[in-house]
């Protein structure tokens, strides 16, 4: 029953804060009016042009930009955020009323994702402020690596000390690699007891760290009676399921290691496949009504995160439309000023916008889902457990009897009880059954229930499916931030990530989860559909962007114009758009409290990423549509800074922010844009040198100031590539890439010349 104190029952557990954005709306509408004026100008002056195709191309690109801008305005029109009050929750609700939560951590490769990072994720989650008997943590290891199991076993031993320590002293950051920074020492005025325990803890963590590092360097011997016997001679892409219950103690949640069955005959569906196995295995074992999933490169940064989530859950208890709570993905040690433009800070306003529509997108990590929502229920479905048992549950959820029983429990809404600890091991056989690689044949897994297949952005696809059934979602941003993770810290890994997103998001448009379809046929709200559309179109945006970025160079080389001339009145329109847009985005950055440098980096990388990574995303999608290739999920490299150099955030080492390059062709379009603009400018300057001094202004105007300016701006945007041409070692763009780009750039120049002779 609720604990009563008049005060605490009257105050809400969560509050929606509406942001006033009238000023922003006005500016956005003004920019829109300028964009429309530009289009009108294009139409009106079409007849006076001698270069119709050029004018038409510019018109098409600008129409597209205007369309994207309209989408942004609609998404950002209303803005809100959420504040949650865990203190009030603790006063109002008894701990035993809290729902159980199954926690899922995924890892796929002990080299790309060093075990110590994954283990810190695990430790931070085991130590949260939440009744530990309500939690179970499942670690999915797609690499089938004995190192991961070994690390987990050792980590649990350490957790038996670490978790009580954190709770006793109310430690704020419960991922040891963040708590024990190289220079940290306990404070002078901390109690002696604390200082002593602190040192023990630091040493223990140091030992754990060393054990894992040492273990990573030697092969695991095949010891038939050890925990690792199952790993004897296994191949990571062809092996039976391995599931181990690792016993903790009463202070620790259950911990279960899972390496699902892999068989080359059955597609394993990357992370989505792993999440579905986690859902089923946990369904058989603990069957909590809520599930939290955290990628191995994130950790819980706020020990009260579960309580914050419960504020939302309890707040919505009577409003049955609530599907999931997403916590933001923020980054620790993010490179200063975001040189690669991958920290997504600039999306804050869009996120607040989406939050005020149907709710935040599911972002793949840091999200609490209700199990019944993942099992395919819609807000208005009322199901009796008898009905499900008798009906066609096998064709939906599969043949496992245990899973069907537990699903029936969840779907009928009866309070699922967590099974007691001792029985977990006895459920391993049933768990192995549902972790089989062919379990899903003839069921709805991946098609209608669970994490959906068919996109490398399985998170967005799964999320849109949930919203499409009419569920709402919430975003909760407590202070300190709930989860922190690492953004890819090198340029190639950031490129790979952006490319994967561009493909994955585009793939969604070609499924039956297309936002427009879902809003017509399903229950996706119209504005929410537009928000999804904006997201899914990332890859498509590369095409108009590349076209538009080649226009200035084309014009300078051929002596034509795509912008109004300086002496025309219409010249003020593009100037106005450029100036106001930039001032506006600066103003937005100021609101977010980020530096001028960061603003420039996001602007510049906006152009660079669209033209490079997203265009390859688009290309891959085209190849996939024509059946020439398949998309895969490339796991991004995670870096662990060794304890002695906590380098990234202090940029003493300037080099971490420099662009590095590998052989990947993804940057070619960017290098080509750089080259053609350099050639164009060179061309322009040469022409200027040839004319007499007093004609120079006329000539400049003839060349088109606007076009020249655009060219210079583009070169500034691609400045890092320019440096890459002259860098050394990994800072140098590989010769093969340069060569291919030169060929393409010369081809472009040739085309310009040919077309101007027509
Ligand atoms: O076959 C696979 C591939 C990946 N993963 C896991 O998936 C997670 C995300 O992979 P990562 O390489 O870190 O991708 P990111 O680009 O950082 O991931 C973002 O984008 C993905 C979709 O593209 C989402 O799934 C993620 O949650 C989101 O953080 C990691 O825990 C991996 O271990 C697997 O379990 N099995
Ligand atoms: Mn990641």
Image (cartoon, rainbow, N blue to C red):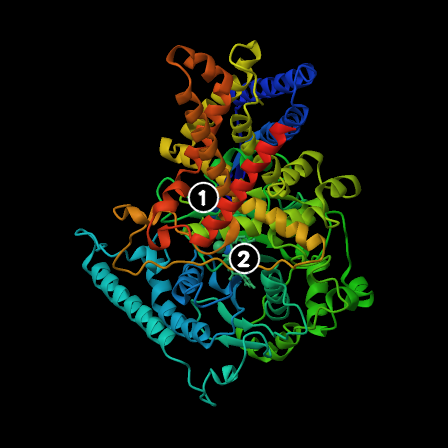
Task: Give coordinates of residue 642: x percent, y percent.
Answer: 30, 61
The secondary structure type at the circle numbered 2 is strand
The image shows residue 698, relative to residue 205, as above or below, that is: above
The secondary structure type at the circle numbered 1 is loop
Q: Residue furthest bottom?
A: 224
Residue density around tag 1, few if under 14, some if 14–19, many if 20 or more, within 10 Å: many
Left or right: residue 405 compared with residue 313: right
Q: Earlier in the sequence, mark 2 or mark 1?
A: 2
Q: Residue at x 52, y 41 (%)?
A: 745
The answer to whether residue 354 is seen in the rendering is yes
Task: Give coordinates of residue 428: x percent, y percent.
Answer: 59, 78
Q: Tag on residue 293?
A: 2
Which residue bears the numbered disc 1? 343
Q: Residue at x 60, y 21 (%)?
A: 35
Residue density around tag 2, few if under 14, some if 14–19, many if 20 or more, within 10 Å: many
Which mark is nearer the camera, 2 or 1? Answer: 1
Q: Dividing the picture into quarters, in which one does residue 26 lie?
A: top right
Q: Residue furthest left?
A: 188
The image shows residue 427, relative to residue 45, as above or below, that is: below
The answer to whether residue 320 is seen in the rendering is no
Task: Give coordinates of residue 123: x percent, y percent.
Answer: 41, 63
Residue closer to the observer: 21 or 471: 21
Q: Residue at x 64, y 19 (%)?
A: 36
Left or right: residue 301 compared with residue 665: left
Quadrant location of the C terminus?
Answer: top right
Q: Dividing the picture into quarters, in which one does residue 454 lie?
A: bottom right
Residue closer to the observer: 525 or 169: 525
Ligand 1 lies under 8 Å from the Cβ of mark 2: yes
Task: Give coordinates of residue 448: x percent, y percent.
Answer: 73, 57
Left or right: residue 106 compared with residue 436: left
Residue closer to the observer: 279 or 517: 517
The CA distance from mark 2 to mark 1 is 20 Å
């Amino acid at each position: 029953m609720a604990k009563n104190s008049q005060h605490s029952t009257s105050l809400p557990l969560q509050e929606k804060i509406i942001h006033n954005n009238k000023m922003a709306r006005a500016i956005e509408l003004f920019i829109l009016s300028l964009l429309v004026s530009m289009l009108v100008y294009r139409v009106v002056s079409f007849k006076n042009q001698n270069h119709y195709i050029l004018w038409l191309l510019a018109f098409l690109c600008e129409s597209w930009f205007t369309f994207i801008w309209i989408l942004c305005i609609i998404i950002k029109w209303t803005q809100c955020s959420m504040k949650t009050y865990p203190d009030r929750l603790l006063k109002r609700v008894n701990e035993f009323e809290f729902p159980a939560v199954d926690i899922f951590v995924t890892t796929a490769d002990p080299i790309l994702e060093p075990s110590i990072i994954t283990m810190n994720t695990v430790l931070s989650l085991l130590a949260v402020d939440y009744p530990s008997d309500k939690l179970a943590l499942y670690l999915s290891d797609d690499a089938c690596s004995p190192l991961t199991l070994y690390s987990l076993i050792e980590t649990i031993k350490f957790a038996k000390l670490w978790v009580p320590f954190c709770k006793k002293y109310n430690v704020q950051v419960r991922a040891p690699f963040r708590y024990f920074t190289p220079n940290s020492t306990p404070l002078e005025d901390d109690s002696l007891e604390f200082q002593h325990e602190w040192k023990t803890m630091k040493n223990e963590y140091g030992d754990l760290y060393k054990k894992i590092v040492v273990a990573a360097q030697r092969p695991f011997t095949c010891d038939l009676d050890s925990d690792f016997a199952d790993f004897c001679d296994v191949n990571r892409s062809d092996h039976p399921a391995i599931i181990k219950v690792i016993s903790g103690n009463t202070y620790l949640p259950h911990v279960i290691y899972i390496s699902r069955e892999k068989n080359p005959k059955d597609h394993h569906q990357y992370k989505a496949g792993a999440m579905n196995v986690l859902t089923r295995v946990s369904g058989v074992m603990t069957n909590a009504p809520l599930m939290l999933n955290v990628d191995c490169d994130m950790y819980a940064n706020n020990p009260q995160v579960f309580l914050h989530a419960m504020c939302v859950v309890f707040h919505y208890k009577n409003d049955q439309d609530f599907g999931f709570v997403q916590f933001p993905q923020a980054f620790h040690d993010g490179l200063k000023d975001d040189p690669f433009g991958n920290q997504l800070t600039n999306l804050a306003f869009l996120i607040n916008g989406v939050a005020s529509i149907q709710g935040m997108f599911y972002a793949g990590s840091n999200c609490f889902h209700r199990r019944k929502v993942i099992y395919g229920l819609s807000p208005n479905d009322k199901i009796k457990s008898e009905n499900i048992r008798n009906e066609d549950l096998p064709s939906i959820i599969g043949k496992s009897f245990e899973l069907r029983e537990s699903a029936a429990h969840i779907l009928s809404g009866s309070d699922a009880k967590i099974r007691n600890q001792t029985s977990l091991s006895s459920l391993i056989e049933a768990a192995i059954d549902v972790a089989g690689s062919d379990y899903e044949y003839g069921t709805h897994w991946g098609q209608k229930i669970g994490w959906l297949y068919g996109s490398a952005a399985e998170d967005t696809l799964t999320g849109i499916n949930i919203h499409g059934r009419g569920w709402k979602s919430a975003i909760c941003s407590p202070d300190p931030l709930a989860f922190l993770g690492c953004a890819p810290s090198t340029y190639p890994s950031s490129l790979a990530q952006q490319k994967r997103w561009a493909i994955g998001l585009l793939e969604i448009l070609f499924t039956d989860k297309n936002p427009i379809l879902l809003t017509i046929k399903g229950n996706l709200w119209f504005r929410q559909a537009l928000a999804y559309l904006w997201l899914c179109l990332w890859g498509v945006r590369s095409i108009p962007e590349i076209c538009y970025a080649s226009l200035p160079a084309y014009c300078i080389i051929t002596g034509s114009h795509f912008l109004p001339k300086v002496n025309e009145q219409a010249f003020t329109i593009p100037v106005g758009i450029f100036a106001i847009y930039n001032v506006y985005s600066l103003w937005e950055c100021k609101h977010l409290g980020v530096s001028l440098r960061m603003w420039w980096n996001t602007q510049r990388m906006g152009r660079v990423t669209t033209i490079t990574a997203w265009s390859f995303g688009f290309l891959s999608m085209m190849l996939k549509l024509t059946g020439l290739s398949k998309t895969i999920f490339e796991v991004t490299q995670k870096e662990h800074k060794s304890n002695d150099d906590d380098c990234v955030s202090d940029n003493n080492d300037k080099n971490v922010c420099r662009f590095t390059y590998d052989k990947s062709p993804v940057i070619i379009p960017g290098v080509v844009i750089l080259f053609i603009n350099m050639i164009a400018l060179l061309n322009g300057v040469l022409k200027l040198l040839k004319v007499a001094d007093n004609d120079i202004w006329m000539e400049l105007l003839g060349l088109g100031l606007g076009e020249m300016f655009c060219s210079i701006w583009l070169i500034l945007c691609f400045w890092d590539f320019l440096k890459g041409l002259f860098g050394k070692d990994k800072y140098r763009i590989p010769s093969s890439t340069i060569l291919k780009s030169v060929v393409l750039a010369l081809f472009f120049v040739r085309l310009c010349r040919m077309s101007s002779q027509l």
